[in-house]
Image (cartoon, grey):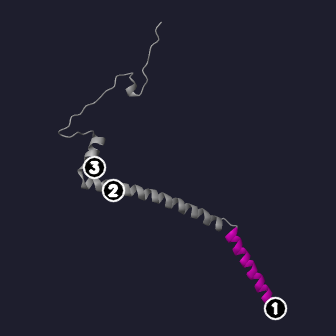
Amino acid sequence: MVVAVKWLAGALLIVVVLLQYRLLVSPDGIREMRHLEADVAAQRSGNATLAARNARLAAEVRDLKQGLTALEERARSELGMIGSRESFYQVVPQPGSAVDGQAPTRTAQR
């Protein structure tokens, strides 16, 4: 009877050690859990960014459906449209002037 209890205690000890090994050392244990927690945190951050983007798009759709000012602004900026009582003036800078973003070119004279 005493020998059977010793064998049972030894077998249980081996099982506990093997389970602890699998939990602490193996790639499926705590390391994998930490990696998965980091992945979940990154995904939640990405989801928050996308949720904010969706909220902005929903507000823009709501503005376009309800009011004319947002619709007019879109038509002006994206389609280049003007109102019926408006005049369109286009100012074209001369080549080489500082207005078009380039420095004027000078030729050297002797």
The vertical placement of 62 against 1, above or below, is: above
Q: Is residue 81 above or below residue 110?
A: below
Inter-mark Cα distance, 3 to 1 = 88 Å
Q: Position of residue 11 (x, y in %)?
A: 75, 82
Q: Are marks 2 and 1 in contact (CB under 8 Å)?
A: no
Q: Callout 2, which amino acid?
A: Ala
Give the x, y percent position of residue 59: 33, 56
> Does residue 100 belong to the magenta stretch?
no
| Rendered residue at 78%/82% (across/down) | 10
Instruction: Name the residue rendered at 23%, 50% in the picture.
Output: 68
Between 78 and 11, the one lying in front of the other is 78
| Rendered image: mark on residue 59 | 2
Write the residue at 76% across / 86% down. 8
Query: Which badge, 2 or 3, comes first in the chain's sequence?
Result: 2
Are the residues flagged by discs 2 and 3 in contact, CB closer than 8 Å? no
Q: Which residues are magenta?
A: 2-24
Query: Which one is nearer the viewer's eye here, 22 or 110?
Result: 110
- Left/right of residue 93 with respect to residue 104 in the rendered view: left
Crowd rating for badge 1 (residues with CA inside 10 Å; few <14, some 14–19, many 20+): few
Q: Which mark is residue 70?
A: 3
- Mark 2 vs mark 3, CA separation in Å: 11 Å
> Residue 39 location in percent, x, y?
55, 61
Q: Position of residue 40 (x, y in %)?
A: 53, 63
Residue tagged 1: 2
Cα–Cα gap, marks 2 and 1: 77 Å
Considering every residue shown, the one lying at the far top of the view is 110
